[in-house]
Structure formats: structure tokens, C-alpha cells
Amino acid sequence: MVADLLRYLTAATLTFATGVLMGYRPGGGLVGVLSTVLFVVVCGWSLAWIFTYVGTIARSAQSVQGISLMILFPLTFLSNAFVPVSTMPDWLQTFVDVNPVSHIVTASRTLANTGQLSADVGWALLGCLVVIAVFAPLSVRSYTKEM
């Protein structure tokens, strides 16, 4: 899990650095960018607890990867990460509005582009706390049972 933190920090830093090299100028300034990086690292780390648990109960690395894709693929593509919500059908907008990935994406964009906290930050962090509260104990218990 510590390695995951470092990996998320590196990925977020490289993403922003590449964006700046390509011309992106975050309106939130350095504070907005650092807040976004910290926010994304926390969200990624909390989700890693789900996959840590899956890793302790799955039979192979391939099954962990498959289960991870089954969870993340629909959540990512059925969010506002790639397409504006207003262009989606009504039934899909309803799902996108409650999708936790949409809250993370909107919160990240708001932090980086304006430097302001939004309700999406609160909702995403609440979701992170719930995930950690559920999956961290399950992961630890499953891991210690295997030993």
C-alpha cells in the first residue's frame, strides 16, 4: 500500500508536468495543483484497498486483474471523465451523477482549474472513508488468515 502511494504521487506529478509542457495552465495555481495531487492520491489509495482485498481472496494474479477491470472499466467509462454529461441520454445522466468516479473527476478539475473546494470533494472523500472503513479491515483479516 505504501508503494501504491508513491506510484500515485509519481503518476499525478507526471500527468501535471506533461500537461504544463503541452500548454495547460491550471487556474488554481500551485495550491490548486498540489491539492488535486493530494486528493487524487488519497482517492487512489482508498480504492487500492478494494483490490488489496481482492488480491487476498483471488486464486491468481490474472483473476485480480480481471476483477479490477470489471469494476473500474464501467465506472470510468460511465462517468464524466471523457464526455460532457449534457450530451448523454437522460438515463445515463442519472447514473453518471451518482457515479463516484464522476465526483472524483469533477472535484479534481475544480481544484486544479479554480483552486476551490466543491461539494464533490466532500462526497468523494466520504466515499473514500467508507471504502477504507470496509475494505481495510477485510484485507487485513483475509491476509492474516492466509498466513
Image (tube, rainbow, N blue to C red):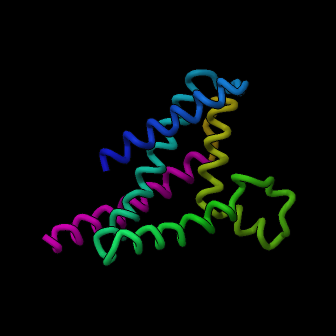
Residue, x 87% and y 59% (percent of image)? 87
Residue, x 63% and y 22% (percent of image)? 29
| Most common SS among magenta residues | helix
Where residue 37 sits in the image (x, y, percent)?
Answer: 51, 35
Residue, x 57% and y 21% (percent of image)? 30
The residue furthest bottom is 59
Vertical relation: 44 (above or below) 16: below
Residue, x 67% and y 40% (percent of image)? 109
Image-quadrant location for residue 79: bottom right
Where residue 19 sits in the image (x, y, percent)?
Answer: 65, 30
Q: Quadrant of the C terminus?
A: bottom left
The residue furthest top is 30
Bounds of the magenta segment? 120-147
Vertical relation: 91 (above or below) 98: below
| Lateral position of residue 115 relative to residue 80, left or right | left
Name the foreground residue: 122 vs 139.
Answer: 139
Where residue 74 sits in the image (x, y, percent)?
Answer: 63, 68
